[in-house]
Image (cartoon, rainbow, N blue to C red):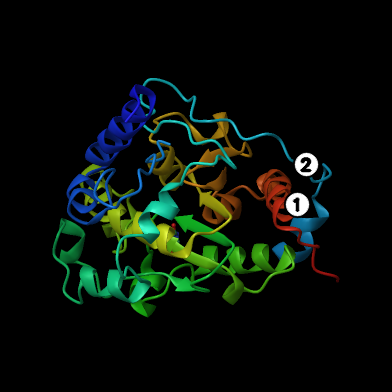
Amino acid sequence: MDPAKRARVEAWLQYGEDLGIGPYFRDRAVTPGNDGASPALGPAPLSQGFAANAAAPPSTTPGRAFALGASNLMPPVALGAAEPSLFEIASRIEGDTLERIREDIGADCARCKLSKARKNIVFGVGNPKADLVFIGEGPGHDEDVQGEPFVGRAGKLLTQMIEAMGLRREDVYICNVVKCRPPENRLPEKDEIATCSPFLLRQIAVIQPKVLCALGACAAQTLLQTTQGISRFRGEWFDMLGAKFIATYHPAYLLRNPSAKGEVWKDLQKIMTVLGLQPRRR
Ligand code: URA
């Protein structure tokens, strides 16, 4: 393997270790040399009020590749690069499916302390072949009771956002960084994120969306591996794991700060441009 490729493989494996998914990829991934190929591992109503707030025309800007600072652990992945992305590599993980991931989590998962108070594990919902995946932080009370992400007040707003984009809720996939409700709706803690995020990465790898949209700081910072505030990079494109990644404000934030809806609508319009979507006709 040439030195540049080796460096990228090592960077990717280090990223896996940092995220706590090293064992998963070590145990199950096709690694260079054992598949006959030599993959370059790739560090490679809102409906009205929301759209009516739209200020800017849809625009696309070139993706920037993880330049968020020292805490950024994920090496850049070039969109459209000839080399395989994580998704391509993960798709070679034999037989991985959403069902298998759900089974691996198990009905009685007790890997972290969130298991103590949760009622239901909230796995994710939607189109398993979605072009667009929304990622929130973790289930709240309603989600914990119903076992489905984004079904409470923030969820209803998310559904309206999706519909304003000309989609239905069932067209996209919706999931969270952690699958169990943090008590009192506190932020998920580092160890909980480290324990649960491998399942999120597997979900993304199986779905292979064109666009990943992080809702709020927790999802954005987890996926970008940064501690920078979301307002520093909200609405910017990143090339991530073979998809285009964008972060926007969480719908719960919009419930508290309706004036931010215009900013979020601009972000959604960027996604619509990439996916060739027309806004819903009113
Ligand atoms: N907030 C989230 O981040 N996720 C949910 O599923 C519900 C509310």
Q: Residue at x 68, y 46 (%)?
A: 267
Res. 273 mark: 1
Q: Point out residue 9 in the picture as x, y percentages from the top left corner.
A: 32, 34
Give the SS element for disc 2. loop
Q: Residues within 10 Å of mark 1 (few under 14, many from 20)?
A: some
Give the SS element for disc 1. helix
Label pair 2/1, CB-CB below 8 angstroms: yes
Q: Is residue 125 above or below residue 1?
A: below
Type of amino acid under label 1: Thr
Type of amino acid under label 2: Ser
**Label 2 residue near ligand 1, CB within 8 Å:** no
Q: Point out residue 67 in the picture as x, y percentages from the top left corner.
A: 49, 24
Q: Is residue 4 above or below residue 185?
A: above
Q: Residue furthest top?
A: 70
Q: Point out residue 154 in the picture as x, y percentages from the top left corner.
A: 53, 62
The reply, left or right, for residue 191 in relation to residue 160 is left
Q: Residue at x 59, y 37 (%)?
A: 234
Q: Residues within 10 Å of mark 2 (few under 14, many from 20)?
A: few
Q: Which residue is mark 2?
A: 59
Q: Residue at x 53, y 60 (%)?
A: 133
Q: Is residue 239 above or below residue 197?
A: above
Total labels: the figure holds 2
| Pick the front one: 245 or 214 | 245
